[in-house]
Image (spheres, grey):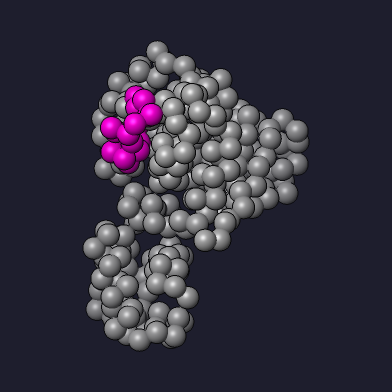
Amino acid sequence: MKREERRQEIINLLVESRAVELDDIAARFGVSRMTVHRDLDELERAGVLRKVRGGATIDAGTQFESDFRFRERQEADVKRALAETAAALVEPGMTVMINDGSMAAVLGDLLAQTHKPITLVTNNAAIMERAKGLSGVTLIALGGVYSVRFNAYFGIVAEEALSRLRADIAFISAPAAAGRLAYHMDEAVVRSKRAMMRASSQTCLLINNRRFGHTALHVLADLTEFDTVISDKPLPHDTAAELGEATVVRIAKETTT
C-alpha cells in the first residue's frame, strides 16, 4: 500500500471510531511504529487529527465531520470521481454555481483547470482562494458571514447576491439523505444551497453513497428537485424506487492513477 493510500485509510478509520491506536495501525498495514508516527505527524500538521499517547483521535461534536480540512482529505478518490462525473455536465463558457464543502471544492478546482473559459459563482472559500487570478476563470465570490466550520460564507449578503444572479447549473452537496429527502444540520447552509438552486437553470446533487440512511435537523430538498443526482454507488433501493424517472441518476466511477 502506498503512503497516501495508508494515510487515507487512517482517516477512514478515524471516521468510523474517532480514535486509533498506534500498534493497531502498524499491525493492520504491516509497517513499523516509526512509519505510523510519521503518518500521524503529517496528518496532525495538516490539521486533520490530534496525536495522543499511543495513537490519535479527532474531535467531533456532531455525527458528521465538521472540520473542513478533515473532510477535504477524507475519501479523496470518491470526491475526485464525483467531481469528474459532474464536470461532464459542464461546457466551457457556462456559468456554474458551486456550494460549500470539501467535495464541491474538488469540483471547483477541476472546472477551473479544465473547462475554461468559465464563470464560477461560489461561497466556498477554498474555491475562492484557488481560483482567484486564474486565466480564463471569472470568479464571482459571494460575501456574507464567514463560517470556520464550513469554510464558506453565508447569510443575508450571500442570499441577496444569489437572488440577483442566474447560472446554467448549480452543484449542491449534502451530508445526509434518507428516502427521497436530503438533509443538512445547519439552517444558514440550507438557505444558501436553496438560493443557488433557485438561481440556476439546472441543479445537480453530489452525494457520497454512505451518506444515505442518515438524517439531520433540516430538510434541504426533495431529491426530485434536482435534475441530476450523482453518487459513487447505486442509490438505495427504496430511494431509487421513489425517484423513478423524475431525476437522472449518474454513478461515478473511481479512476486508477
Q: Name the residue located 27 percent from the left edge and 26 percent from the top edge.
A: 144
The answer to whether 233 appears left or right of 193 in the picture is right
Provide the residue span drawn in magenta: 123-140
Provide residue 62's location: percent of width, then percent of height. Answer: 38, 52
Q: Nearer the viewer, residue 95 or 93?
A: 93
Provide residue 54's location: percent of width, then percent of height. Answer: 28, 81
Provide residue 8's location: percent of width, then percent of height. Answer: 43, 65
Residue 81 drawn in magenta = no
Q: Name the residue located 29 percent from the left edge and 33 percent from the top edge.
A: 132
The answer to whether 152 appears left or right of 106 in the picture is left
Q: Say above or below: 9 vs 135.
A: below
Residue 129 drawn in magenta = yes
Q: Quadrant of residue 162?
A: top left
Q: Name the residue located 49 percent from the left edge and 50 percent from the top edge.
A: 79
Q: Name the residue located 67 percent from the left edge and 40 percent from the top edge.
A: 249
The answer to whether 221 appears left or right of 250 in the picture is left
Q: Say above or below: 62 vs 127.
A: below
Provide residue 47's location: percent of width, then percent of height. Answer: 27, 59
Q: Say above or below: 83 vs 24.
A: above
